[in-house]
């Protein structure tokens, strides 16, 4: 199967995907309720889109295509309210967070869909362990060449999004000491990590993708679990490193931060991306996952060590004029507040300290998602 032609889309438009947890309100464990929830939602008007995910304890919601923060956050809030109302009818809680704090992967059920069954047969227990929850952000690109330029230029900022979205400190009932433990599960898949360093869509399509397809290892772009990947059928790049935040407001803020960065990078004011930029990529990624905003990263051009928190704040200040042009100012201000006050991972640890249990952590996440 040949790679799809890269569809031109309006530059800097954006869309958000959120994978959400379905939780029993009796014991706060995950519950295999997605078939019932999706059936109920199919009878209701639903803004955007809602689809099953690989196990029955999760769903994915998709926003429409938006150009500014106000539109995006308004739709995500309507989607959230629709989900919360449906969940109350079924006596289930819905929440964000990159991992469920104490669920057992062996208890999960694969959703009855051909692709999910195929993935399960190929990856074995890893498929059930993939009951983790992320936010994906799509940004429209004028061409495949622009998409690859942005993909590689954004590699320097991947730790920002990991740290700002981090919401997965607990796994199997224990504090992992990571702020984003979720990405460790993604790394278990063979086609994860960074995309290959190709700078033209022609090269990517006819040399890299064609060769990979010929090996039989991959059949389509869906088989790549890269941190950022091009989506030719949409005409976008897709950032995939974020944990699902605890609120839709934070999800919208992360999306407009990416939108603003892309607007800035497309002006070609920074040095062009190079293969050597990836020398520090895995180290920086680890620092953001492990220590969150308290991490230290290495600049890929100068090799200077930087406080991740200060680097984010410096970049957010640089994005202010772009945010003003794009209607993203409120979202960027939200992230400044996060950088000062702490991420969702910090909040979840506070809730554990207050409640003394991982069940209390889930209860707090449910209430936070409701916006109450």
Image: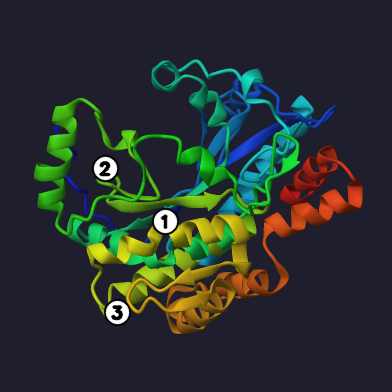
Indicate the position of residue 315 as horizontal and vertical percent values: 48, 78
How far apart marks 3 and 2 lie (CA) works out to: 29 Å
Element type at mark 3: loop
Indicate the position of residue 103 as horizontal and vertical percent values: 70, 30
* Residue 5 placement: quadrant: top left
Question: Horizontally, is 363 left or right of 257 in the view?
Answer: right
Is residue 11 at all visible to an observer of this figure?
Answer: no
Residue behind mark 1: 282
Tell me: residue 258, above or below residue 79: below
**Quick one: label 2, few (<14), some, or many (20+) residues within 10 Å?**
some
- Return the disc, 1 or 2, that comes first in the chain's sequence: 2
- Residue occupying the point 34% across, 51% down: 194
Question: Horizontally, is 42 left or right of 231 in the view?
Answer: right
Counting every numbered tag in the picture gives: 3
Q: Nearer the viewer, residue 6 or 244?
A: 244
Element type at mark 2: loop
Question: Horizontally, is 312 left or right of 259 in the view?
Answer: right
Per the rendering, the mark at residue 270 is 3
Q: Label 2 near label 3: C-beta < 8 Å?
A: no
How far apart marks 1 and 2 lie (CA) works out to: 29 Å
Tell me: residue 39, above or below residue 351: above
Indicate the position of residue 138 as horizontal and vertical percent values: 40, 53
**Quick one: label 1, few (<14), some, or many (20+) residues within 10 Å?**
few
Question: Horizontally, is 87 left or right of 260 in the view?
Answer: right
Indicate the position of residue 147 as horizontal and vertical percent values: 26, 58
- Residue occupying the point 58% across, 62% down: 164
Residue behind mark 2: 233
* Residue 300 placement: quadrant: bottom left
Element type at mark 1: helix
Give the label, 3 or 1, closer to the camera: 1
- Return the disc, 3 or 1, that comes first in the chain's sequence: 3
- Return the disc, 3 or 2, that comes first in the chain's sequence: 2
């Amino acid at each position: 199967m040949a790679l799809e032609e890269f569809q031109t889309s309006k530059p800097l438009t954006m869309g958000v995907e959120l994978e959400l947890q379905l939780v029993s309100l009796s014991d706060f464990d995950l519950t295999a309720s997605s078939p019932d929830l999706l059936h109920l939602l199919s009878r209701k008007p639903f803004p955007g889109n809602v689809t099953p995910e690989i196990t029955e304890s999760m769903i994915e919601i998709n926003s429409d295509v938006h150009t500014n923060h106000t539109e995006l956050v308004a739709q995500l809030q309507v989607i959230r309210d629709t989900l919360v109302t449906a969940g109350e009818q079924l006596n289930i809680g819905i929440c964000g967070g990159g991992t469920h704090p104490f669920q057992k992967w062996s208890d999960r059920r694969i959703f009855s869909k051909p692709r999910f069954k195929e993935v399960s047969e190929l990856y074995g227990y890893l498929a059930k362990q993939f009951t983790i929850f992320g936010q994906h952000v799509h940004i429209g690109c004028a061409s495949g060449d622009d998409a690859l330029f942005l993909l590689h230029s954004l590699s320097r900022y991947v730790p920002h999004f990991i740290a700002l979205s981090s919401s997965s400190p607990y796994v199997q009932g224990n504090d992992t000491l990571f702020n984003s433990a979720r990405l460790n599960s993604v790394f278990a898949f063979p086609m994860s990590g960074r995309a290959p360093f190709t700078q033209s869509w022609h090269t990517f399509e006819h040399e890299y993708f064609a060769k990979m397809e010929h090996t039989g290892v991959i059949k389509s772009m869906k088989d790549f679990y890269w941190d950022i990947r091009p989506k030719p059928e949409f005409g976008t790049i897709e950032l995939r490193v974020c944990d699902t935040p605890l609120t839709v407001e934070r999800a919208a803020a992360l999306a407009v931060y990416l939108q603003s960065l892309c607007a800035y990078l497309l002006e070609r004011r920074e040095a062009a991306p190079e293969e050597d930029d990836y020398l520090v990529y895995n180290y920086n990624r680890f620092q953001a996952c492990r220590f969150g905003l308290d991490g230290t990263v290495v600049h890929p051009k100068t090799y200077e060590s930087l406080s991740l928190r200060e680097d984010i704040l410096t970049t957010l200040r640089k994005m202010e004029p772009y945010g003003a042009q794009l209607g993203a100012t409120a979202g960027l201000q939200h992230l400044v507040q996060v950088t000062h006050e702490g991420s969702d991972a910090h909040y979840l640890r506070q809730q554990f300290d207050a409640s003394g249990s991982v069940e209390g952590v889930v209860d707090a996440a449910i209430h936070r998602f409701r916006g109450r």
